[in-house]
Amino acid sequence: MARPQKIGLDYFPLDVYVDQDDKIVLVEAQHGVVGFGVIIKILMKIYSEGYYYNWNEKEQILFSKRVNVDINTLNNIINDCVKWEMFDSNLFNKYKILTSNGIQIRYFEAASRRQIVEVIKEYLLVKNGALKSFTNLVIVNINKDNDNINTEEVVVNDNISTQRKEENRIEENSIDKYLNILQRIKGFPYDDKIDTEYYLTLEERYPTLDLVKAIQNFSDFKLGKEYKTNANHRLQISNWFKNDVEIYKKNLKPLPKIQDDNYFSRRM
C-alpha cells in the first residue's frame, strides 16, 4: 500500500539577523514585539504545512487562539505583512494564502531530497530559471490535475522517468517493510499515521542510513524485552539510528549484539 508523502518541514532556516530585515522592522515598529512574534509563529505554521498557508476565517480563528492574540490585532499584523511585501499580495487577495518567493525557495531547498514535491501552479512564485534546479517538483493546477499544464509557461516535471518511478516503488516497499517490523516490536505503541510520518522524518534526518536494516537491528535487540511505560519509544529509535550513522562516519565496524540491559543505555 502506498504511503502518504510528507508535506511539511520539521525545521526551517531562520537568520540570526532576521529582526534587521526592513519588512520585519516595519511590522515590529507598528505592532511591537507582538508583531514580531506573530511573524515567527506564522512562518512556523507555513513551513509545517509546506510552502503556503491558507488564511481563511477558520485558520484565522484557530491561529488567533493558538498564539493568544486578538483576531482583529492578528489580521492587522498580517495585512501589514502583506502591505510591506513579506507575503505576496496577489496570491493573498486572490486565493487568501500566505506565501512568498523566498518562502517557496527555502521550502523547495529543504525538501530537495524527497522523491516528489507537488506544487500548485497558481500558487507558484519561483521563476523558471531558479525552478530548474529543483528536479523533484511535480506541478499541478489548483484542482491537483497536471494533465493540461502548459510546459512552456513553467518547468514541469510531471513526466517522471522510469527510474524515478522505480525509486518510488522501492521507497514505498521500504516504508512498508519498516512499519511491518515496527509493529512486531513487543510493547511498541504503533500508530500507522504517526509512524509513517516519523519514518519520513527519520529518512530526512539520516539520508545515508538503510532504515529497514536499522529498525531490524533495533528489533533484534529489543527481542525478549519490553518498554517501560514512561519510555519515549520513538526517541529511542532515533538515538539508535544516530549512533549507527556516527559509526558509519567513523568507518568503524558495527557494535556487537550484546544482549544485556546496559548495551542499549551505552548507545543512547
Image (cartoon, grey):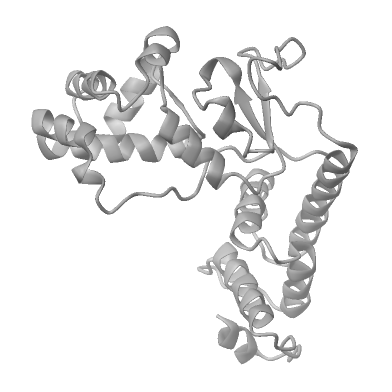
Looking at the image, residue 249 lies above or below residue 190: below
Q: Nearer the viewer, residue 13 or 220?
A: 13
- Quadrant in which the C terminus appears: bottom right
Residue 38 place in picture, x, y as percent: 25, 35
Task: Kindly indicate the quadrant of the structure image that contains residue 132.
Answer: top right
Q: Is residue 85 left or right of residue 58?
A: left
Residue 241 place in picture, x, y as percent: 64, 71
Specify whether residue 243 is in view: yes
Residue 93 place in picture, x, y as percent: 37, 9
Residue lying farthest to the front in this orientation: 129
Q: Residue visible at 63% across and 63% down? A: 206
Looking at the image, residue 105 lies above or below residue 253: above
Looking at the image, residue 76 lies above or below residue 49: above
Residue 163 place in picture, x, y as percent: 87, 43
Q: Residue visible at 43% across and 35% down? A: 103
Q: Nearer the viewer, residue 136 or 32?
A: 136
